[in-house]
Image: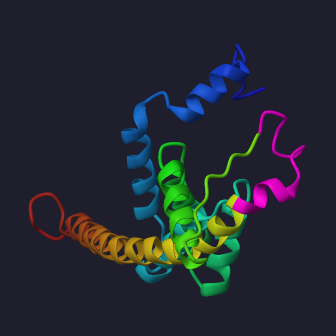
Amino acid sequence: MLFKRRQTESLLERVRIHMWPRRSWGRSSRYVVYRLRRLSATPHAIALGFAAGTFAAVTPFIGTHMVMAALLAWIIGGSIVASVLGTFLGNPLTYPFLWYASYAVGNALLGGKATKKTIDLSHGVFQSSFEHLWPILKPMSLGCLPVGIAMATACYFLVRPMVEAYQHRRRRELHLRQRRAVVGPRGAAP
């Protein structure tokens, strides 16, 4: 096969790379920003799509974030690719903060009756009954709405000017490059 590895990675190695990329989180985040800038949609559509992805990343329903973000971006007219990139805001480093914020806000919206809840997941999530998960999932599901809207709004207003500036600079450089090609190396027309 053309792009197959000579030695397949073990499951432990794949999990380690998912938690901590080979070339650091900084390089991975720069790649996401680079891909976001290179999208050819309007800055408004890209920012809307990224905001949809951010909103989806805040929800506690792991495994559905990318599909949820793509559907939400399609509904509101944002870029679907940008929405998928926006879901990368939710990662193993940020999930604890996002989930805690969602739970705290949801618990406050439900009347603030925070009681200590313990859930035994030693047998797995799917063997546990929904009644055991609902006391935590209910406040998180409700709390993710205001937290997600706030984060999506913040991301929209951060991403849109970035994309506008980048696209403007890129158009200007392309125009200058085309002008140099027409004028020639010595400044005279060919």
Depth check: give the residue in front, 55 or 99. 99
Q: Quadrant of residue 166?
A: bottom left
> Is 138 displayed left or right of 89 in the figure?
right
Which residues make up the magenta segment?
A: 121-135
> Measuring 57% from the left and 29% from the top, which residue is drawn there?
17
Residue 94 screen position, x and y as percent = 48, 50
Residue 20 screen position, x and y as percent = 50, 31
Depth check: give the residue in front, 162 or 138. 138
Quadrant in which the N terminus appears: top right
Depth check: give the residue in front, 75 or 126. 126
> Measuring 67% from the left and 61% from the top, which residue is drawn there?
66
Depth check: give the residue in front, 46 or 111. 111
* Identity of the residue furthest to the top in this view: 7
Is 47 magenta? The answer is no
Q: Report the predominant secondary structure element of the magenta stretch.
A: loop
Residue 47 screen position, x and y as percent = 45, 75
**In this rendering, is residue 11 above or below 20?**
above
**In this rendering, is residue 118 above or below 168?**
above
> Is 167 displayed left or right of 93 in the figure?
left
Residue 41 can be seen, yes or no: no
> Measuring 49% from the left and 71% from the top, which residue is drawn there?
147
